[in-house]
Amino acid sequence: MTKLLRAIVKKGGPFIGLILVIAIFSAPAETRGYFLTYHNFKIILTQSVIVSVGALGMTLIIVSGAIDLSVGSVVALTGVASALLIQHGWGAVATTAAAVAIGAAIGLVNGTAVAGLRMPSFIITLGMLGIARGTAKWLADNQTVSYDASPINSWMTTLNPAGRALPAGVWVAVALAALTSLILKKTVFGRHVFALGSNEAAARLCGVPTVRLQIMVFALAGCFFGLSGLFQLSRLRLGDPTVAVGLELDIIAAVIIGGASLNGGSGTVLGSIIGALIMAVLRNGSQQMGWPNYFQEIIIGVVIIAAVFLDRFRRGGRS
Amino acid sequence: MPGFRLRLGGISKAFGATRALSSVSLEVQAGEVHALVGENGAGKSTLLKILSGAHEPDSGTMELDGEPYRPDGPHDARERGVAMIYQEVTLAPHLSVQENILLGSESSRLGWINSRRSRERAMEALAVLGYDHLPLDRETSAFTIAEQQVIEIARALLLKPRVLIMDEPTSSLTKADTERLFEVIGRLRGQGVSIIYVSHFLEEFQRVCDRYTVLKDGETVGTGAMPGTTIDHLVSQMTGREVSDLYPRVARGLGEPVLEALGLGRAPRLRPTSFALRNGEILGLAGIIGAGRTDLVRAVFGLDRADAGQVAVFGRPDPHPSAGRSWAQGVGFLSENRKEEGLMLNLSVRDNMTLTKLGSYGTLGWIGHRRQSAAASRWTAELAVKCTGAGQPVGELSGGNQQKVALARLLEHPARILLLDEPTRGIDVGSKSQIYEIIGRLAAAGKSVILVSSYLPELLGLCDTIGVMHRGELVAVRPCGEWTEPELLRFAVGKE
């Protein structure tokens, strides 16, 4: 019996979890009418973009055996900086490039400190969490930064319920997910990231340039976080230095629900995306059920623990 | 004839469809050191687990001093007087010697530890082993593996065991430390403790054991008195075939130097050292642990940065080699520490074998999956690696098979100069002889090998040249024929 169950969980993994939460919210009378509609799924997908794109970067970092706690602050900082640039008349393309560059620069600093100074990533990025948040507030002069209009605003819109088209942000997330998955699975860089996370000493022995690799991982992940900041801006339509507090925990949770191990060396992009979707569905469904906010938080907490427990079970043992 | 301390009859155990043990018998007398001999997979571990209470037998009888013995878990087994010392040290590294010895059986009242009584008991246990000079308050991580093992034995002694099971106790000990362990075993025997001794080093049985029992394919195939039994006889019972010689001797000539160390040093553990490795040569490095052998090969390979001298590979000098450059020049390294440094345990057999040259299976940074898999499958077949496929995580394999995967990495690369640090540590006889064969074949094909080993018969059996290191210095390098085991030992401990 357990064998059969294990085989099912092994094949489906987090995907079963996703179907399960969708099924749960499709059943009750309160939500039955609306929950399973295309429009609602459009909203769920759009709501999950910020966490999903962040989870792509976080997957790289966690697979490499590190962690990044500064994501929420980086998202706020790039959002504020982008808003300021738009105020100064920058176009969408230039602003996007700038946001990605800011994220990458912060990642570069994180990575260099972690790999170069041999400091734990937990500590370095905990420090960066404060530094980036403070910088965002400083740049914004402790206020929100508003601007007239920008094409960026349309990337995350779910308005015009008649429209079938998904917003640009969703497509960008899908494309980046496919690309990241390919990179992790099919390239030398990707294999090296797994090797680094699985056993740094062994990777070094095999001639993998571990220091450079760790820096690259943080910098590349920083690009994703910068982009997440841009999507956050697009959703709010203003630069808010106090936004996305604790976002990193949602992102880490998505990656963990998706089956990655915090010890490094394992994790998949598909898993992380499904993890992000599970959380988005839970939020959306809870709202429609009229459950209070605190109840959502409790549910998500339980789901994280259950997901990791199931993952242990899937791997077949306590060790 | 005294009664048996431990008597097992007709023990059978199956896991699903796999029969691990069928009708095994084992008889151990009081105050006897009994060798349990067998290849990996012969059923030794299962039998030990049954004895120590971790598994229950499906059928059969067990008696301890004439009383029926049916332990209800490892804790119950310990209470009844059957204790086990595991291959890997299981101490809490941050706790002190005393705290570790008393862990789980602290002298306490209402939860408060009675420190004077604790000290006495810890000291008593160490005194039995002749190690009462160990400082009780120092963290155990500060001690050598050999000393940590003594601390573990002291912990086991606290419960006054009647039977002590030692699983591979010498696998990470040097010869000198092994001798000290044998002294400890002698003392325990003198106290009337029965010891079941498991080891891959067959020579040790002759040194320390009174009788033996051989397991093969889950059955008892032989038992007898150790004195008068030859190693060859044991091996033929274990393997079911005659093994005339474990070490292949392939005739070959030595060529030009391919790797030279010139005054290579790394203070304080490695003094400036020079040597040359020739084409087709197997150069052995003997010495006790901490003599600098590992430091030397790591500095040569570029895993540790040398602070003096340089390395010349194929005549090209390099003051600061790096692992990446070494692989590029055809120098490969096999770590003594398979789990911590040698392998990425949760990655596949395939990735572990091919990590040093992933780019070569495809173009522009993409990995050609089919070519990579084909390469890995070829080595799993050629080296008879027991795995479900090249995609299986290497951590799921047995020690011997893991080592073959680690070695396959050097073969696949392919390395022309192989630095092998303790390549046969902790693996079964079958895998060992296979690895000896590979090393012999490599040398015959003109590859060069540096072989670091703490196992002297291995060095004497395989090498063309053997160098001995002592306190960070290469003190003597001679052709193999000019060395004998006592002579090597004399240099290793520094009594020239």
Image (cartoon, grey):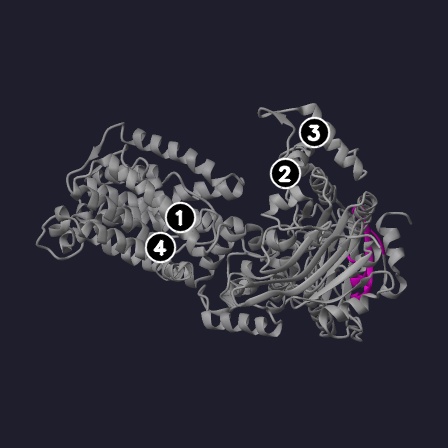
Please state which of residues B259 and B171 is positioned toward the viewer in this rendering. Answer: B171
Contact (Cβ within 8 Å) of mark 3 with mark 2: no
Residue B186, placed above or below residue A246 = below
Query: Which mark, by number, is residue B93?
Result: 2
Give the amino acid at mark 1: Val
* Element type where label 1 sits in the image: helix
Of tags 4 and 3, which is closer to the observer?
Answer: 3
* Element type where label 4 sits in the image: helix
**Chain to which mark 4 belongs:** A
Q: State the separation of the CA atoms marked 4 and 3.
A: 48 Å
Residue B343, placed above or below residue A282 = below
Respond whether the residues carrying marks 3 and 2 are from the same subunit. yes
Please state which of residues B179 and B303 is positioned toward the viewer in this rendering. Answer: B179
Q: State the separation of the CA atoms marked 2 and 1.
A: 28 Å
Q: Is residue A279 visible?
A: yes
Q: State the separation of the CA atoms marked 2 and 4.
A: 37 Å
Image coordinates for residue A192, horizontal then vertical, percent: 49, 57
Going by the picture, which residue comes out furthest to the front? Answer: B67
Give the amino acid at mark 2: Pro
- Horizontal side, residue B127 vs residue B482: left or right: left
Please state which of residues B283 and B381 is positioned toward the viewer in this rendering. Answer: B381
What residue is shown with label 3?
A: B137
Image coordinates for residue B485, horizontal then vertical, percent: 87, 58
Residue A313, placed above or below residue B229 = above
Would residue B275 be counted in the magenta stretch? no
Going by the picture, which residue comes out furthest to the right? Answer: B496
Which stretch appears magenta? B455-476
Image coordinates for residue B76, horizontal then vertical, percent: 61, 44
Task: Name the residue located 89 percent from the left edge and 56 percent from the top edge.
Answer: B486
Of tags 2 and 4, which is closer to the observer?
Answer: 2
What residue is shown with label 1?
A: A308
* Element type where label 2 sits in the image: loop
